[in-house]
Amino acid sequence: MRTDVARGALAYLALLAGAVLAVAPLALSALTAVKTPERFASESPLAWPDPVTGENFRTVLDQGLGRALAVTALMTACITLGQVVFSVLAAYAFARTEFPGRDALFWVYLATMMVPPMVTLIPLYLLFAKLGWLNTFWALVLPFVFGSPYAIFLLRQYFRGIPEELIGAARLDGASTLDVIVHVVVPMSRPILATLTVITVVSQWNNFMWPLVASSGRTWQVLTVATANLQTEYNARWTLVTAATTLAIAPLIVLFVVFQRQVLRSISWTGLK
């Protein structure tokens, strides 16, 4: 009994240490962002800000970060919506529809996950250059909006666990394939769809290389590129740099807090299965 208690205590201590290591940089960045440059230069980085100021946030927003934030939010929303819709349709086809070569096609498509993004970067750039779509909103969205191998694989595995009796009952009631997806599959898949939404938002919100290549200037500049430019422009002013990074991270934290229950439900469902 004591051995089990000791193991449990060690496990919780390890988890606590991991949580501290993960949260400490974010907390330090937020603390630095609300300090004046003079207080930051004269005090320990761990000192509590006194006075608390929002001037750093106003400065970086005036320098173009506000527009970059809006562009990133619009881009991420469009890509996430497209990823969820097209991935649901493709995953249902691979999980529940019978057609010749279905499994072979699925595994060939899944194998594209092994191709590094850098390999397709130049061909993708040349394609959009030929179309004249560089430095447009479509250049940011189109390469990612039609689903991804990981999203389709994730949903396919989940859809295969839905009881066939439910789908058969809907068929007997005269439901079409689209009706089955909308009224049976999607409502039962809310946890995994929430997980996919979080994963897609985080990956696209933090996307850096393709937006850097596909856009120039500030018209369609995304948050990651704008933050990198601010780090170069204000290299010695860490209060401004941390204000920009805090603004970039804050929406992702809010997103996880909102969807954390659904994410945990999808993990527990997979474990029970």
Image (cartoon, grey):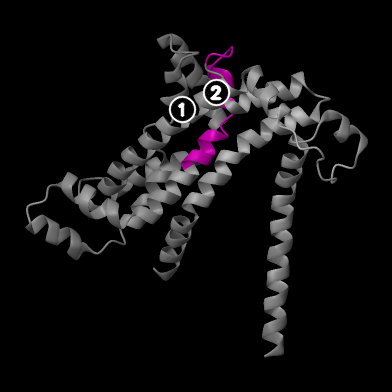
Relative to residue 181, is residue 243 depicted above or below?
above
Q: Which residues are magenta?
A: 200-219
Q: Residue furthest front?
A: 51
Circle on res. 75: 1
Is 153 on the left or on the right of 70, as rendered?
left
- Between 64 and 111, the one lying in front of the other is 64
Quadrant placement of the C terminus: bottom left
Q: Position of residue 115 (x, y in %)?
A: 51, 36
Q: Residue at x 47, y 23 (%)?
A: 140
Relative to residue 147, is residue 179 depicted above or below?
below
Marks 1 & 2, CB-CB < 8 Å contact: yes
Q: Which residue is mark 2?
A: 211
Q: Residue at x 47, y 58 (%)?
A: 261
Question: Is residue 14 a member of the stretch shown in magenta?
Answer: no
The kind of residue on which mark 2 rests is Pro
Is 260 on the left or on the right of 23, as rendered?
left
**Location of residue 152 (image quadrant):** top left
